Image (cartoon, rainbow, N blue to C red):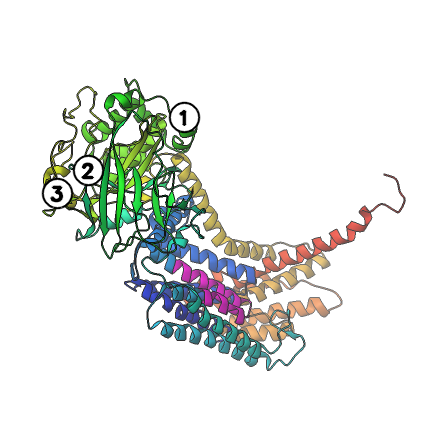
Amino acid sequence: MSGRARLALTAAAATLMASCALLPLVSPRTWMFQAAFLVAIQTGVGAAARRVPLARPLTVAAQALVTLLMLTVVFARGHAVAGLIPGPDTFRYFADLLQQGSEDVSRYAIPAPLSDGIRLMLVGGVLVVGLIVDTLAVTFRSAAPAGLPLLALYSVAAGLSDEPTDWLWFLVAAAGYLLLLLAEGRDRLSQWGRVFGGVSRVPGGQESGAVAPVRTGRRIGFAVLSVALFVPFVMPSIQGGLLDGTGNGVGVGAGNGGTISAVNPLVSLRDSLNVDEDRQVLSVRTSTADVSDLYLRIVSLDDFDGTTWKPAQRHITGVPDTFPTPAGLGGDIKRATVRTTISAADWYAQDWLPMPYPPSGVKIAGTWRYEPVGMTLVGDHGQNTRGETYQVTSLDVQPTAEQLAAAPEPTAAMKKEYTKVPSSLPSVVARTAQDVTAGATNHYEEAVKLQDYFAVNGGFQYDTQVQVGRGEGAIANFLKQKRGFCVHFSFAMATMARTLGIPARVAVGFAPGTPQADGTVSVGLKDAHAWPELYFEGVGWTRFEPTPTRGTTPSYTVSDSPGSSVPDQAVPSTGASAAPSASASASESCTAQQRKLDGCASPSAAGAVTDGDGGGTSLRWPLGALGGIAVVALLLSPMLWRQRVRAKRLGSYARTEEGIAAHTLAVWLELIDTAWDFGILPDESQTPRGTAARIVRLGRLDPVSAASAHRVADAVEQVLYAPLSRLTPGIADDVRRVAVGLDGPASGLTHFRALLLPRSAVRVVWAMSAGWARLRGRVAAYRPTLRKPSGQQG
């Protein structure tokens, strides 16, 4: 094994050893086997590219391309052309997975479950670091700086983990880096001897100013290891999720300002609903007699980009003693004050504070910030709900159907911000909204018709296993399949409401829980829910419930639609006390226990509103096919170029002395390149006769092929040294016989490589480099002629 190959293997091993520091962060740890396998392939591609040899940038590009293809096959095969070639949908899926992974990281305590998003972050991160380390240490032969990406990989793990045995992982990572430095020093010294100073030469004729590489590497290594030891001590330990509040974009300081760019909480909803055991999340004690309408709202999603709903970036402030009146709520709307005490489980670490909406005051310890637009509280600097008990004063807003129907048009600012839909939204969504609400005379009637369409008379079924695709067409798919769960229903209704000019957003939180004998309400994981909120001027943001068998239908949404099966009593539990039956649904009788057993499973935050039949489907496959053809053409280009060059060299020629000489030299070059393709590197120091003998010996040619090689060498010597060039008949056929002779004893892998990845194809790169140098020389020579002589007028 060559020194360069050993260095490449050591670089891969150093990357994997540093990656071991990530093992305590997730469970199970099987992702490491997958990462090791992919890093091995990545390293092998780099070794093959350097063996050709390819230029350094092309080597890195080849490794990056193979890395992308591997990630596509492993994580996004169903979104790639022919399951291999990445296209636009592949990159959108990668973005969705990365977003899901970042949300999972924020959600879970260590060790987090190995979701697809976290697995992509881990495996993809290791591959990226592995590519950087291989590029620095092997391709560019500078192992000392390669410690920086290794340090970054270890520091991320050290900053997140709080295990007493973390120092063991540091020793493993440090050992990998030191092995890399030693391997590079050994490789340098074995090839060039000790370098004490001055300029040395490296393979390829390039100059290197490396001075005492081993000593320099040790110094840099010592500095890097010192930083690695120091970083875990200065980085704060992470409590709760894998990222604290600052990781979620929460502003720092005294709480008087800052912004929040929140993560999408739908992943928490999904994971909560997919658990096997319905654990209690919150224990609630409230002053209201009817708990059937006690929704606990966590956050609102008001930014819809056609792919997903998510919280918009908002300004945050300190928590006020008394919250302002909710936006749009008029003085003539009946309301009551409700006081609620909420206790969170000691394992439930939520960055957002679950509260009844709209809140008018909160008493809670810890570091919290207030977002005025959504009237929500979010933890700062790692603050979360784990084990917290807090009191919330809220308003029970009780509008009537008449007040909602008489609501004036929303303000221009409200419509501008909350009725936006992307142009890529399939037209069937808006068309369906128009058909469903036909005959409505105001926005309230349109909203009720939309709710009834989903919950009662549209033929929709509650299904936690349905798949509606990904992308802008997912809502269109949901409307076609008519099967889904709370995320699908809320997203679809909010989107359709926006197409009708009704300001809409999606709320995420908990549906009413199960009343207990001691007067409290138990809210479990399976009570997690999503619902739409529509804005009516004079009333404000108003809850609707389009999901069948989930939650409770608001009392102010009595339908006037012909043929509607909505009962006169819109809320089954109206007038009831805190009895277990208070959680029944308006659209279908369903006890709280049944609701918990059914759940509202969501496959992913982005999956609820992504892909399908709409928006650009007609162009997707042609573009994907063109992309696939381009990739195949790129992969076959070395073989095609080589065949074209071979045909030109061995083809026709001018019957002049110059033509005979040029043809003979071209045939000789083809003989050298053919041997090169089979692994016999050119040696320009040899004479033609010595070169032929070397090809015969290394290629293990049979007597017939050996005689052909020597005839071509004799022809070249005659052209080079004889006073008059004369034609040697049949030398083109001699080269073809040599090629057959080289292919005979070669292995299958050597034959495959000589055909598809011929080493001599590197001459294209050399030719491009020489052409670029000539062009620069011509430009430099031509530039002075463009200057005007001194004093010449224009």
Q: Amino acid at mark 1?
A: Thr
Q: Which residues are magenta?
A: 123-152
Question: Could you tell me if residue 738 is visible in this image?
Answer: no
Vertically, is 783 above or below 193?
A: above
Image spot of residue 117 (x, y percent): 34, 53
Whole-number angstrom distance, CA of label 3 to CA of label 1:
42 Å
Callout in the foreground (3, 1): 1
Q: Disc 3 designates what residue?
A: 594
Would residue 725 be found to the left or right of residue 643 on screen?
right
Mark 3 and mark 1 in contact? Answer it, CB < 8 Å: no
Callout in the foreground (3, 2): 2
Q: Disc 1 designates what residue?
A: 411
Q: Amino acid at mark 3?
A: Gln
Q: Residue at x 39, y 74 (%)?
A: 172
Q: Crowding at label 2, few (<14), some or many (≥20) Cα neighbours within 10 Å?
A: many
Whole-number angstrom distance, CA of label 3 to CA of label 2:
12 Å
Vertically, is 44 above or below 67?
A: below
Image spot of residue 687 (x, y percent): 65, 74
Q: Crowding at label 1, few (<14), some or many (≥20) Cα neighbours within 10 Å?
A: few
